[in-house]
Image: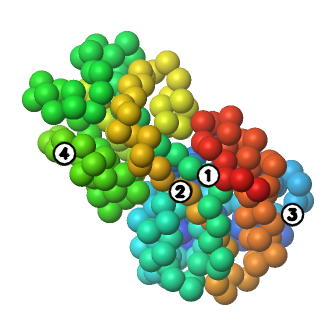
Amino acid sequence: MAVATGSVGCSNDDTGSDSVLDVYAAASLTQTFTEIADMYEKAHEGVDVRLNFAGSSALVNQIQQGADADVIATADEATMQRLGDAAVDPKIFATNTLVIVTASGNPKNIDGFESLTNPDISTVVCAVEVPCGAATAQVERNTGIELSPVSEETSVSAVLAKVTSGQADAGLVYVTDAKGAGNTVSAVGDPAFASVVNSYLIATLQGTPHAADAQMFVDMVLGETGAEVLGAAGFTPAPA
């Protein structure tokens, strides 16, 4: 299994296996889709899953510019809709909500969304073009609280990296990212986050030469295997 982060997909070249399945997935799915892809390869001998993780918007841009992909998974519905008929029968497979992450132990004593307006607290968010950024903007509209972030990143993983590396005091990521980071961060919730829910969608791509393999991967994500992996990571799997 090959994994790329933020790179433009290339053609299905020879990697030593009978078939290569290119799966493009939102950065917040890195842990779960890597695990699911490993299970898929074990269950489908001769198929090598090549994963490309980046912000959902960047992935859609890559596909629209001609990059090869067999499966696409985005962190919201609006981004998937940009593909139009190129995405075949998109289905919701999980949901996620935002949370604030800080350095371990929460040294700045952040206690909610409004704390991030403190000029002594440096905050990073996703750019509004990315689903996690769109969710952050919705929380701002709902609460009337406007943030002044020190940077706007192209993926939720980039936001998390800024916090874990000490380049920012706080960041807005998904609950699953905070859980995956373990004790390297502290998570701070806010009641305002509960009303802004991101739905994750998955679809095969129109014209893929690996339609059968692609559909089986989608089915695994939508089925019991996907639900178990996603649930363990903190996602709320969609009802079967």
Marks 1, 3: nearer the viewer: 1
**N-term-proximal mark, 2 vs 3:** 3
In the rendered structure, which amino acid carries the disc numbered 4? Gly
Of residues 7 and 135, the one nearer the viewer is 135
Q: CA distance from mark 2 to mark 3?
A: 32 Å
Q: How crowded is the residue under tag 4: few (<14 C-alpha within 10 Å), some, or many (20+)?
A: few
Mark 2–mark 3 CB contact (< 8 Å): no
Residue 80 appears at what percent x and percent y?
A: 50, 70
- As displayed, is residue 199 above or below residue 191? below
**N-term-proximal mark, 4 vs 3:** 3
Is residue 6 something that shows in the picture? no
Picture disc at residue 94: 1
Query: What residue does disc 3 label?
Result: 46
Picture disc at residue 72: none
Secondary structure category for the residue under label 1: strand
Marks 4, 3: nearer the viewer: 4
- As displayed, is residue 219 above or below residue 198? below
- The residue shown at (35%, 21%) is 103
Query: What residue does disc 2 label?
Result: 199
Is residue 218 something that shows in the picture? yes
In the rendered structure, which amino acid carries the disc numbered 3? Gly
Query: What residue does disc 4 label?
Result: 144
In the image, taking residue 132 as reference, residue 75 lies left or right, namely right
In the rendered structure, which amino acid carries the disc numbered 1? Ala
In the rendered structure, which amino acid carries the disc numbered 2? Ser
- The residue shown at (81%, 49%) is 224
Mark 1–mark 2 CB contact (< 8 Å): yes
